[in-house]
Image (cartoon, helix red, strand yellow):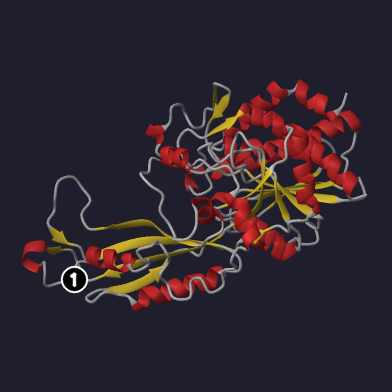
């Protein structure tokens, strides 16, 4: 029996294991789920040990643990497989059609929190390893596994783990189970993702909320001031108005822009899906360019004043906002954060004071070289599985690990996830297409054999 035959015969069993895994509410951001996080890490470690003679250990961090495993019996080359076992909170619960932590198969889709991001995709390499050990007694190449529990909160403790274990994690390339294909009807490989930098700030006027009749018009309203300063962040055409924001942006060349323009993109369908009347963004760029290769500054939340039922006629003394910037090569997260902070400081409206804060959440943008052998292997394998050449696309979101692996280990990351971007991860009714699970199992098995041959 071949590894592919072994996997095909166990499709239902593997789906049942994914359902078991997804029942664990491993919500990394919520302290109430700390025990669940530990249980999820133990589940992953146990599946690694069951897969075969893999040396498995749990690495403690300042937060949730990292599960590490390795099998080095093939000589060379060596893959470092990455994934994460933590998930987003399921809120709002009332928007789910079924219990987010009682996964349910409906119409060829498995619904549940984390099934697509990232428990389904990260289970795939575990089962592929098991298939090779069961049928051949060995893997076709060396494999190291690194599964973290904090991706959904910015991988805040992963950098020190990688830095302290650089020798242990040495490999030729990272094969990431995290990420997503662009569309469910088109094989694709992601060649780059944007970075991120966040900032929170508050404006304060008086020492308390004031009666709007007695004080209105004579004391600054913090919400009015917030509206003014937030409006100053962009020009009317959608361009970010922060001085120096675009200084380090590497512009796309004509060939890159033409390649994006040639992609089949249904703008009307995109707008219908998100429920927006029209597209909006930086002038001079199309929607895909704005999502993939241009930097952004977004207001993620604003609040202040009375928000209860009915009315309370006050002049609010405080207003708060959260901002995030998505970054492209060669923008530096810390420099961008400093530029935005300076803009806020120089645009504070009269009558209020500014306080900057918020937890540091930053990651650099990443792009894999176009001729990287790991990337070429992925394209070759996807063409075998789907019968057509995959598209090269980019990702508007951020996967901080790719930049960490490049900076700390000097190796590139191939995104090889079989989720697709329409599977509602981070939202109610997240799902994973069952056929994508099976396609991923085949593709990962083919990848390991193909990459081993290409590096001999």
Residue underneath mark 1? 220
In the rendered view, tell whether residue 221 sits above or below residue 307: below
Percent across and percent down for residue 175 are 74, 48
Please name whichever residue, 351 or 24, is drawn nearer the observer in this view of the structure.
351
Residue depicted at 32% across the width and 62% down the height: 320
Q: Is residue 258 in sight in this rendering?
A: yes
In the rendered view, tell whether residue 32 sits above or below residue 63: above
Percent across and percent down for residue 138 are 89, 37
Q: Secondary structure at mark 1?
A: loop
In the rendered view, tell whether residue 390 sits above or below residue 439: below
Q: Is residue 400 in sight in this rendering?
A: no
Q: Residue furthest bottom?
A: 346
Quarter of the image with the N terminus in it: top right
Q: How packed is label 1: few (under 14 Cα within 10 Å), some, or many (20 or more)?
A: many
Tell how many labels.
1
Please name whichever residue, 338 or 184, is drawn nearer the observer in this view of the structure.
184
Residue depicted at 73% across the width and 59% down the height: 369
Residue 234 lies in quadrant: bottom left
Percent across and percent down for residue 109 are 56, 26
Left or right, residue 340 beside residue 250: left
Please name whichever residue, 213 or 269, is drawn nearer the observer in this view of the structure.
269
Percent across and percent down for residue 11 are 71, 23
């Amino acid at each position: 029996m071949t590894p592919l035959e072994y996997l095909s015969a166990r499709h239902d069993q593997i789906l049942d294991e994914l359902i078991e895994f997804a029942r664990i509410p491993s919500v990394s951001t919520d302290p109430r789920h700390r025990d669940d996080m530990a249980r999820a890490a133990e589940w992953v470690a146990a599946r690694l040990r069951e897969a075969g003679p893999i040396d498995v250990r749990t690495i403690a961090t300042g937060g949730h643990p990292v599960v590490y495993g390795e099998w080095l019996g093939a000589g060379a080359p060596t893959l470092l497989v990455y994934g994460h076992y933590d998930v987003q909170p399921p809120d709002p619960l009332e928007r789910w059609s079924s219990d987010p932590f009682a996964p349910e198969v409906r119409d060829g889709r498995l619904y549940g929190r984390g099934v697509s991001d990232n428990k389904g995709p990260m289970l795939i390499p575990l089962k592929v390893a098991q298939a090779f050990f069961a049928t051949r007694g060995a893997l076709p190449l060396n494999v190291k596994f690194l599964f973290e529990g904090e991706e959904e909160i910015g991988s805040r403790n992963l950098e020190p783990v990688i830095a302290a274990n650089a020798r242990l994690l040495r490999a030729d390339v990272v094969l990431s189970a995290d990420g997503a294909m662009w569309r469910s009807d088109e094989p694709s490989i992601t060649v780059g993702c944007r970075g991120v930098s966040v900032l929170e700030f508050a404006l304060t006027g008086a020492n308390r909320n004031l009666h709007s009749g007695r004080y209105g018009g004579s004391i600054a309203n913090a919400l009015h001031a917030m509206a003014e300063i937030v409006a100053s962040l962009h020009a009317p055409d959608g361009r970010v108005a922060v001085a120096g924001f675009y200084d380090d942006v590497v512009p796309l060349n004509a060939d890159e822009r033409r390649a994006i323009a040639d992609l089949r993109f249904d703008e009307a369908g995109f707008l219908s899906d998100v429920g927006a009347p029209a597209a909006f963004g930086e002038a001079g760029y199309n929607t895909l360019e704005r999502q993939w290769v241009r930097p952004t500054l977004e207001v993620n939340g604003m609040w202040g004043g009375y928000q209860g039922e009915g009315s309370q006629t006050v002049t609010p003394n405080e207003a708060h906002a959260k901002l995030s910037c998505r970054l492209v090569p060669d923008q530096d997260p810390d420099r961008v954060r400093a530029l935005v902070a300076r803009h806020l400081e120089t645009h504070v409206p009269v009558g209020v004071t500014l306080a900057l804060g918020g937890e540091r959440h930053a990651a650099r943008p990443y792009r894999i070289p176009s001729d990287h052998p790991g990337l070429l292997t992925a394209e070759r394998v996807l063409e075998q599985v789907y019968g057509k050449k995959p598209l090269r696309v980019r990702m508007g979101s951020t996967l901080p690990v790719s930049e960490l692996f490049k900076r700390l280990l000097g190796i590139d990351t191939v995104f090889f996830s079989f989720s697709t971007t329409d599977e509602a991860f981070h939202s109610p009714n997240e799902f994973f297409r069952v056929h994508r699970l099976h396609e991923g199992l085949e593709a990962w098995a083919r990848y390991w054999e193909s990459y081993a041959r290409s590096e001999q």
